[in-house]
Amino acid sequence: MAEPWEMTLEEFRKTHKATRCFQRYDHNARADRQASHRMGHRQREAIGEYFYVHDFAPGLAFPSQGRAVSAAHRNVVERAIKDGLPVPVAVLVQYPDLSQLQTI
């Protein structure tokens, strides 16, 4: 299996999923959102009922799973470039601004 920085975003998305977390509310905020259990997942995302985190983007939270995975992949590729690891051209094409870092 390839290392995360050697995968394209599509390959990374299939193998490294983001984790969904629920917001914790105090009593007053919970009362305001008491009917949220009747909402669908898109409505919950819209009001911020839950958020997504990713192991490769520590300390950050995202409103959608797609954004979390995209940010995590970019973070992994950027770190690999800074560490001097060989990042394939197919991956660098997805991040033109990062490919400039590798040539420096």
Image (cartoon, helix red, strand yellow):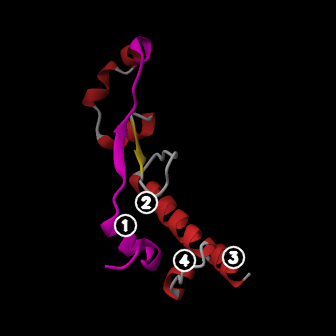
For the residues marked 1 and 2, what is the alpha-carbon distance in whole angstroms? 6 Å
Residue interval drawn in magenta: 1-29
**Residue type indicated by callout 1:** Arg
Residue underneath mark 2: 69
Residue type at the position of mark 3: Leu
Residue at the (52%, 46%) spot, across then down? 60
Give me the C-alpha separation between circle 1 and circle 4: 14 Å
Q: Earlier in the sequence, mark 2 or mark 3?
A: 2
In percent of width and height, residue 20 lies at 34, 45
The image shows residue 80 at horizontal and vertical percentages of: 55, 73
Residue 4 belongs to magenta span: yes
Query: Which one is closest to the eye, mark 4 or mark 3?
Result: 3
Q: Would residue 35 be found to the left or right of residue 95 on screen?
A: left
Q: Which mark is residue 101?
A: 3
- SS for tag 3? helix
Instruction: Name the secondary structure under disc 4.
Output: loop
Q: Which residue is mark 1?
A: 13
Give neighbour class at mark 4: few <14, some 14-19, many 20+ (Cα, 10 Å).
few
